[in-house]
Amino acid sequence: MLLSLQQRGLGQPPKLAIGDGALGFWAALEAVYPETDVQRCWMHKTGNVLNYLPKSVQEKAKQGLDGRGPR
């Protein structure tokens, strides 16, 4: 995908790439556009963190993360 974008005229490297943590994407990005900054998608990152918590506290933790606090 990145090579195709480059071949179709995306000459300037993207300033920022946001992804879900797929290692193949990050490796390809480094090979094709090494100067591009990377950022992990916050939705996926937050979901992964919540999955490590016990189910009994996940909802309360999620409410704390979204700024609304516990209900």
Image: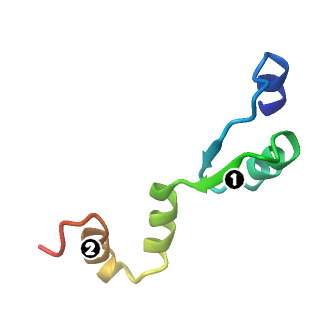
Quadrant location of residue 32? top right
Q: Earlier in the sequence, mark 1 or mark 2?
A: 1
Q: Amino acid at mark 2?
A: Gly
Residue 60: x, y in percent? 25, 76
- Residue 69 is left or right of residue 22, and the answer is left
Q: Farthest residue in the top direction?
A: 8
Q: Amino acid at mark 1?
A: Ala
Of the numbered discs in the image, which one, if any, rests on residue 64? 2
Residue 49: x, y in percent? 48, 73
Q: Residue at left 85%, top 20%?
A: 7
* Residue neighbourhood size for the residue with mark 1, other residues' Cα within 10 Å, grouped as few (<14), some (14–19), many (≥20): few
- In contact (CB < 8 Å): disc 1 and disc 2: no
Q: CA distance from mark 1 to mark 2?
A: 27 Å
In the rendered view of the protein, which quadrant contains the N terminus? top right
In the rendered view of the protein, which quadrant contains the C terminus? bottom left
Residue 30: x, y in percent? 82, 49
Residue 35: x, y in percent? 78, 47
- Residue 38 is left or right of residue 3, and the answer is left
Q: Is residue 8 above or below residue 27?
A: above
* Residue neighbourhood size for the residue with mark 2, other residues' Cα within 10 Å, grouped as few (<14), some (14–19), many (≥20): few
Q: Residue at left 16%, top 75%?
A: 70
Q: Considering depth in this image, is 60 or 10 the residue closer to the camera?
A: 10
Quadrant location of residue 4? top right
Of the numbered discs in the image, which one, if any, rests on residue 63? none
Find disc 1 in the rendering and name its residue: 22
Q: Considering depth in this image, is 2 or 34 the residue closer to the camera?
A: 34
- Residue 19 is left or right of residue 66, and the answer is right
Q: Secondary structure at mark 1?
A: loop
Q: Is residue 2 above or below residue 22?
A: above
Q: Secondary structure at mark 2?
A: helix
Disc nearest the viewer among 1 and 2: 2
